[in-house]
Amino acid sequence: MSREDTAAINWKAFYYRLYVLAAPIAFQSLMLASVAAGDALMLGRVAQNEMTAVSLATQIQFVQNMFISAIAAAGAILGAQYYGKGDRKTIQELFNLMLRFSLTLSVLFFAACELAPGLLMHIFTHDPELIRIGSAYLRIAGWSYLLTGISQSYLTVMKVTDHVMPTAWISSAAVVANILLNAVFIFGYLGAPAMQSRGAALATTLARILELTLCLVVSSGENYVRPAWRRMLSWNRDLTKDFARQCFPLLGGSLLWGVGFTSYTAIMGHLGADAAAANSVSAVVRDLVCCVCNGIASAAGIMVGNELGAGNLEKGRLYGIRLKNISWLIGFGSTALILALTPLIVRMVILTDKAHSYLTGMMVIMAVYMIGRCVNTVTINGVIDGGGDTLFDMYSLAVSMWGIAIPLAILGAFVFHWPVLAVYSCTCLDEVGKIPWVMHHFRKYKWVQNLTR
C-alpha cells in the first residue's frame, strides 16, 4: 500500500469502530472487576481475614480462567478472521470446539474445589484461619466454575460476530446481580442469613446462573451464531488443527502468566497477613484500571483479524501500528489515574497501620507497572495475537516473568528477606522490562498473516 493508499484510509471510521468495539468490552471488563472490588470492600467491612481468605481462594478461579481465556482467545482469533471472510458455518464449528474444551476443564476445577478445597488453599497460605474460611468459600463457589466456560464461549462468539453490546449488557446484569446478592448474603439483608465469605460465594454462583441464562436467551435471536448441538461430537480435522495451533501457545502463555500471578499472590501471602491484605487491595485496583487497555486489546484483535481474514494485509498492518501507538497513551493515562486515586483508596479500606503503609507503597509501584501492562496487553494480546503470532507471548512470559521476576521475588522473600515493598517491586518487573523486546518483535510484522482456509 503506497503513501497515497495509506492516506486514503478512513481513520475517522477506524476510531469510530474502535470506540464501538472497545467501549462495551471495557465496560464489561470494568463490571467484572467490580465484583472483586465489591467482595473486597464488603468483606473488608466484616474482617480483614474474611477479605484476605476470599482473595486467596479466588486465585483458583483465576487459574481456571487462564485455561478458559486461552480457549476463548483462540476462538476469537480464528472467529474474527472467518467473520471478516464471511464464513459463518466455520464460526459455528469453532463454537462447538470451544464448548467441548471449556466444559471438560470446568468439570475438573469443580471437582477439585469440592473434593480438596483445603489442599488448594494450602498453596497460598499456611494460616489455619485463612484456610478454613477459604475452603468454605470454594465449596460453594466451585459450582459457579461449572458454568463459566459455557458462558464465556457464548460471549466470545457474540463479540466476534458484531454483537459486542449485548455481551456488555449480559455481563453487566450478572455483575449488578452479583454485587446486590453480595450485600444480601454477606451482611444478611432482606431476612437472609449473614453468611460473610460463604455469602460472597453463593452470590457468585447465582450470578453465573443468571449470566448463562441470558446468553442462551439472547443468542436465540435472529442473526446470532449458535452451537450446532447435533454435531457436537463430530470433529472438523483441519479446523481442529488450526484451533490447536492457536490455542496451545495461548494456553502456554496463559498458564505462564496465570500461574505466575498466582505465584506472586502466594509469595506475598507468605510474607504475613498485612502484606497479603495490602496486595489483595492493590490487585483489585489494578484490575479495575486495566479495563480500558483490556477493551482496546480485544477490539484490536477483532479489527486487525477482520482485515487480515478479508485479505487486506497492509491495511491490517497499519491498523496494528496505530493501535500500538494508542497503547502508550493509555499506559501513561493509567499511571496518572492510579497516583491520583491512591490517597482515596488507602482511606477507603479498613486495614492495620502496617497494611496501610504497604498499600501506599504498592500503589506507587503499580503506577509505573501500568505503563508496561497497557502497552504489552494491547500490542501482544491484541495486535500480535490477532494475526496469529501467538508463540511470542509465551516466549516473552517464560523469559521476563519466569526467568527474572519470579526468581527474584522468591529469593527476595525467602532467602534475602527483603522488605515487603522490595519483593512487591520484583513482581512488577516483567511488564516494564520486556517493552523493548515487544517493540522489536512487533516491527518484524510476523503477525501480518491470513489464517483462514
Image (spheres, grey):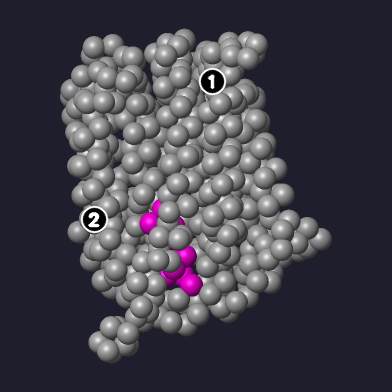
Q: Amino acid at mark 1?
A: Ala
Residue 123, can we see it?
no
Front residue of 406 and 180: 180
Give the alpha-carbon distance from disc 1 to disc 2, as whole Å. 37 Å
Residue 65, which numbered label? none
Say which element carries label 2.
Answer: helix
Q: Is residue 23 magenta?
A: no
Residue 182, can we see it?
yes
Taking the spot 18% from the left edge, 24% from the top edge, the residue there is 418
Residue 322, placed above or below residue 21: below
Horizontally, residue 38 falls left or right of residue 234, namely: left
Which sits earlier in the primary sequence, circle 1 or circle 2? 1
Residue 50, placed above or below residue 262: above
Q: Position of residue 283 (x, y in %)?
A: 35, 32
Horizontally, residue 432 falls left or right of residue 44, namely: left
Say which element carries label 1.
Answer: helix
Residue 329, which numbered label? 2
Quickly name the residue at label 1.
183
Q: Is residue 303 magenta?
A: yes
| Quadrant of the rendering where the N terminus is positioned | bottom left
Taking the spot 65% from the left edge, 60% from the top edge, the residue there is 95
Residue 242, placed above or below residue 95: below
Front residue of 327 and 106: 327
Q: Position of residue 167 (x, y in %)?
A: 57, 51
> Are discs 1 and 2 less than 8 Å apart at CB?
no
Front residue of 337 and 61: 337
Q: Which residues are magenta?
A: 295-306
Horizontally, residue 363 falls left or right of residue 240, namely: left
Q: Position of residue 438 (x, y in %)?
A: 26, 60
| Quadrant of the rendering where the C terminus is positioned | bottom right
Q: Residues within 10 Å of mark 1 (few under 14, many from 20)?
A: many
Q: Amino acid at mark 2?
A: Leu
